[in-house]
Image (tube, rainbow, N blue to C red):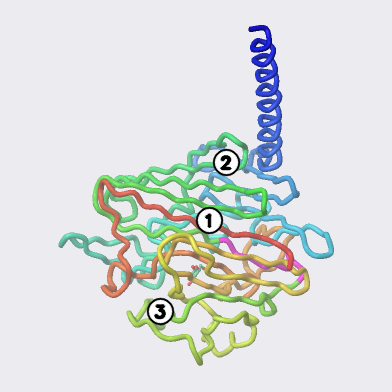
Amino acid sequence: MKKNRVGGICLLIILFIFNLSCSFNNSNKKGMGAAKITTQHFGNFEGKPITEYTLTNASGMQVGIINYGGIITKIITQAKDSSWGDVVTGYDSLEGYTQKDNPYFGALIGRYANRLAKGKYTIDGIDYSAALNNNGHSLHGGLKGFDKVVWETAILAGDSSVQLNYLSKDGEEGYPGNLKVQVVYTLTANNAIKIEYTASTDKTTILNLTNHTYFNLTAGKSNTIYDHLVQINANKFTPVDASLIPTGELLEVKGTPMDFTSAKKVGQDINKVIGGYDHNWVLNKADGLQEVASVYEPVSARYLTLATTEPGLQFYTGNFLDGTLKGTKKDIVYNKHYALTLETQHFPDSPNQHGFPSTLLKPGETYHQTTVFTFSIK
Ligand code: GAL
């Protein structure tokens, strides 16, 4: 009897110690993984306060996000020589981001990222017209897309994620249905920025969301991206007409300047493409989240990989940057080809191109997209 009681007490003590050690390990892991989030007033827009959320992870990488346009304002990463630098374009204050010709620096794009020919599309026999803002076409959601609205924000438990919500009302910019959009930005312990998009609608609509961050991995040390090595897992791309509307064909990249199947300097063939690269690549991928592209900058040795659930990638080399933007960070002159974008998306003008994957979203369905930018040193 006595023996049994002693045995029982010993077992309890062992279980207690085991439990203590488990919870210590868990809290330790949480402490290592979580980022720290600080907030800063960034101005006012349409009477609403704009806040910059700065996420900093344990290794010191930082990401800034504002609730105007869901814009990524900064990404500060380390180079091989241990120096830190901001690898994205942007401005010192909100006025920069709200200026008329701001080319969507860092912004969330919707409802329809990229171009819709003449803004026209048809759903269930009903013709719709999206707001025109680009040579008679509709670009990146129209006159006031998701990049120019104030998003509701919340810091999620764990301090590594900022959630943004926006309700796009029925008819906004020519799109049907009340559309609820949610975007969660997470900075992970392994230097990745994860962007998770979800959306639902109460009427059938079209939807194509992306983020429009411009990268220059030299962090201001070079004013072009010609020496960045880009690799894209895509055997095909969607050629466009002179106004950048897809012709509907899927062409092989092999033997053309569009071939990035092996890492290639952006500057190698850029002069063979009028204006520079501004095309949608048809990613070689199955459904689900998959690594699809990478960018390497040899001087800083910064290496960026891109994974996505989307079927397409708009690789754009800042062809329309012309040095005229005001209030830029450190007064940097953003000239042509200063930076590049990697816009994960469905193909441009899909609603009018029957061979392209559908961008329809129906009531009862949930739109999901995940895109991950991971930074390292190679
Ligand atoms: C890109 C688009 C370019 C240009 C740019 C914004 O996504 O492909 O043609 O419009 O946005 O200046």
249 left or right, relative to 224: left
What segment carries the magenta color?
213-221
* Marks 3 and 1, how far apart at CA: 24 Å
Q: In the image, which disc is placed on residue 58?
A: none
Q: State the residue at coordinates (43%, 86%).
A: 252
Q: Amino acid at mark 2?
A: Ile
239 left or right, relative to 301: left
- The front one of 133 and 279 is 279
- The front one of 276 and 233 is 233
Q: In the image, which disc is placed on residue 50?
A: 2
Mark 1 and mark 3 in contact (Cβ < 8 Å)?
Answer: no
Q: State the residue at coordinates (32%, 68%).
A: 357
Q: Which residue is mark 3?
A: 238
Q: State the residue at coordinates (57%, 64%).
A: 306
Estimate the x, y position of residue 226 in percent, counting from the top left. Answer: 67, 79
33 left or right, relative to 299: left
- Look at the image and tell me in which quarter the C terminus lies: bottom right
